[in-house]
Amino acid sequence: MTDPAMTDSAMNDEVSLLIVDDHPVVRDGLRGMFDNAPGFTVLGEASNGVEALERAAALDPDVILMDLRMPGGGGVDAIRELTRRGARAKVLVLTTYDTDSDTLPAIEAGATGYLLKDAPRDELFTAVRAAAQGRTVLSPAVASRLVSAVRTPRNEPLSAREREVLALVAKGTSNREIARELFISEATVKTHLTHLYAKLGVNDRAAAVATAYQRGILG
């Protein structure tokens, strides 16, 4: 049975939110969800990372619900800049992506938590409250990936196949063309990319190529 005093306390301790997502339908859905739940106030919305920085500075929310892959300014760069500025807001990533190339950079940039968009409503409410208190919140899938990443050195050498994929990426070859040239599926190409991104500590093709040249992996 819930303690009435605890319930009253939770209700009175309102958490203010900024919702950042490039899809209006997602923003509307999240706003409606939190507006109809006691203990939350949605201060505003943003459609990309750049706008999120402006809105965060103006609104000073307790928690920022941040998507990652957004045209016009990604979430990781925004999180990194919020951290650099010493922003009070805690960032809770809410995205559909749980690959190493998304998860690790977001956490390293300063995100307090990382949830997937298929999280149940109550889990999301609990996560936002926990984030507001500075507690780390991770979906089980993301937590397991982080554990694996900690156990795997970031400078782990690339496999021969990963080097082949990276060399083709450096030439501007598309995933489909790489698959055709190496006689593998596009899904396998994407898997190799995910693994080499994690090993290089990057989250996109351009950064992978640049890092590979810096380390002498590509000549």
Image (tube, rainbow, N blue to C red):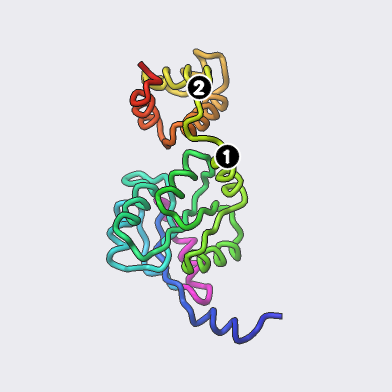
Q: Provide residue 3's location: percent of width, then percent of height.
A: 65, 83
The residue nearer to you, when weighing 122 against 111, is 111
Which residue occupies 52% across, 31% down?
195
Q: Is residue 85 magenta?
A: no
Start-end of magenta stretch:
22-40
Q: Provide residue 75's location: percent of width, then percent of height.
A: 39, 49
Residue named by callout 2: 162
Residue 33, label in figure: none
Residue 111 to residue 123: above or below: above
Question: Tag 1, which secondary structure?
Answer: helix
Q: Nearer the viewer, mark 1 or mark 2?
A: 1
Which residue occupies 31% across, 52% down?
81
Could you tell me how far apart the alpha carbons at marks 1 and 2 are, in whole angstroms?
20 Å
Q: Quadrant of residue 205?
A: top left
Q: Is residue 27 magenta?
A: yes
The residue nearer to you, when weighing 165 against 32, is 165
Which residue occupies 53% across, 40% down?
99
What type of secondary structure mainly makes up the magenta span? helix
Kind of residue at badge 2: Glu
Mark 1 neighbour class, 10 Å CA radius: few under 14, some 14 to 19, many 20 or more:
few
Residue 151, label in figure: 1
Regarding residue 48, the answer to whether it shows in the image is no
Along the polypeptide, which appears first: circle 1 or circle 2? 1
Residue 7 to residue 91: above or below: below
Regarding residue 69, the answer to whether it shows in the image is yes
Considering the image in quadrants, where does the N terminus appear?
A: bottom right
Number of numbered discs overlaid on the protein picture? 2
Q: Provide residue 183's location: percent of width, then percent of height.
A: 56, 14
Residue 140 is left or right of residue 182, and the answer is right
Q: Which residue is situated farthest in the bottom direction here?
A: 5
Residue 104 is left or right of residue 144, and the answer is left
Do the CB atoms of the residues marked 1 and 2 lie less than 8 Å apart? Answer: no
